């Protein structure tokens, strides 16, 4: 069965800390995504990657960066965490194609910044 | 650019009643459309997808959706609600890139479905 694994389900950090969220997929997918989910706002795309070492900004990249050193792993980095980054973070992956394949999601990381 | 609007952030039904969750999209090219479900403290799970074959699409757990181009809609239905259907539902659109696609999705704001006994 396909699997997207996020390293933590719950995480508590302090303002100003550098925070790493890790995501691993076992489906050999080219495309990987990081979303932020907040009540009433749906899913908003932070960054995505279409190949190793390649990345593109999504709709809300400010305050975040990403790293993709290996095909199966996509990391989201909060350079200096702030309280307004408290949220649910979802990672997803999909195969390269014409856009008709679904994204597969991890279970999410609920991040609290104190 | 494409967009998705889900009408109604909360829908409440009785167990056994019809479920109807509304989704309208905007796209400059023929779209691919998806419905996802999210149970509490979990990620999103694919319910069904429309990829330009049959306009009536059947998914998991008894859900189906009909693509109506003239109405730019892709509403999700289920004839008889179960308590286990209580969750948040998201409609999403992907561009038919006609070539290499990054698989980006644009999501609606979500609809929380409550099922009463």
Image (cartoon, rainbow, N blue to C red):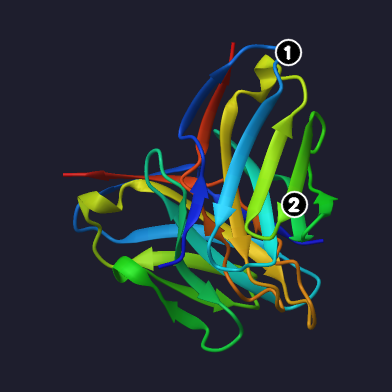
Determine the image quadrant of residue A65: top right
How many badges with numbers are in the image?
Answer: 2
Residue B112, image x and y in percent? 42, 43
User: Is B100 situated left or right of A35 in this image?
Assistant: right
Q: Residue at x 69, y 39 (%)?
A: A76
Of the numbered discs 1 and 2, the one sitting upstream in the chain is: 1
- Output the chain of dot 2: A
- Residue B17: numbered disc: none
Distance Cα–Cα, label 1 vs label 2: 25 Å
Residue holding disc 1: A16
Residue holding disc 2: A69
Which quarter of the rendering shows the C terminus of chain A?
A: top right
User: Is B1 situated left or right of A107 in this image?
Assistant: right
Determine the image quadrant of residue A32: bottom right
Residue B103, image x and y in percent? 70, 67
Image position of B71 with respect to B83: above or below: below
Viewer-closest of A89 and A68: A68
Q: Residue at x 61, y 60 (%)?
A: A93
Residue B13, image x and y in percent? 29, 49
Image position of A89 with respect to A81: above or below: below
């Amino acid at each position: 069965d396909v699997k997207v694994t996020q390293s933590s389900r719950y995480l508590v950090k302090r303002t100003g800390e550098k925070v790493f969220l890790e995501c691993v997929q076992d489906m050999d997918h080219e495309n990987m995504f990081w979303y932020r989910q907040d009540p009433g706002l749906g899913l908003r795309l932070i960054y995505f990657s279409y190949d190793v070492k390649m990345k593109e900004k999504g709709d809300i990249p400010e305050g975040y960066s990403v790293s993709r050193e290996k095909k199966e792993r996509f990391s989201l980095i909060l350079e200096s965490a702030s309280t307004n980054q408290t949220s649910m973070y979802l990672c997803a992956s999909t195969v390269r194609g014409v856009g008709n394949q679904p994204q597969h999601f991890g279970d999410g990381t609920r991040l609290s910044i104190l | 650019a494409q967009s998705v609007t889900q009408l109604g952030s909360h829908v409440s039904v009785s167990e056994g009643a019809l479920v109807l969750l509304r989704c309208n999209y905007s796209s400059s090219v023929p779209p691919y459309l998806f419905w996802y479900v999210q149970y509490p403290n979990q990620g999103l799970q694919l319910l069904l997808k429309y990829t330009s074959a049959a306009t009536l699409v059947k998914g998991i757990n008894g859900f189906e959706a009909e693509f109506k181009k003239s109405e730019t809609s892709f509403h999700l239905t289920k004839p008889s609600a179960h308590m286990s259907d209580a969750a948040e539902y998201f409609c999403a659109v992907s561009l038919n890139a006609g070539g290499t696609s990054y698989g980006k999705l644009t999501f609606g704001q979500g609809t929380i479905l409550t099922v009463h006994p």
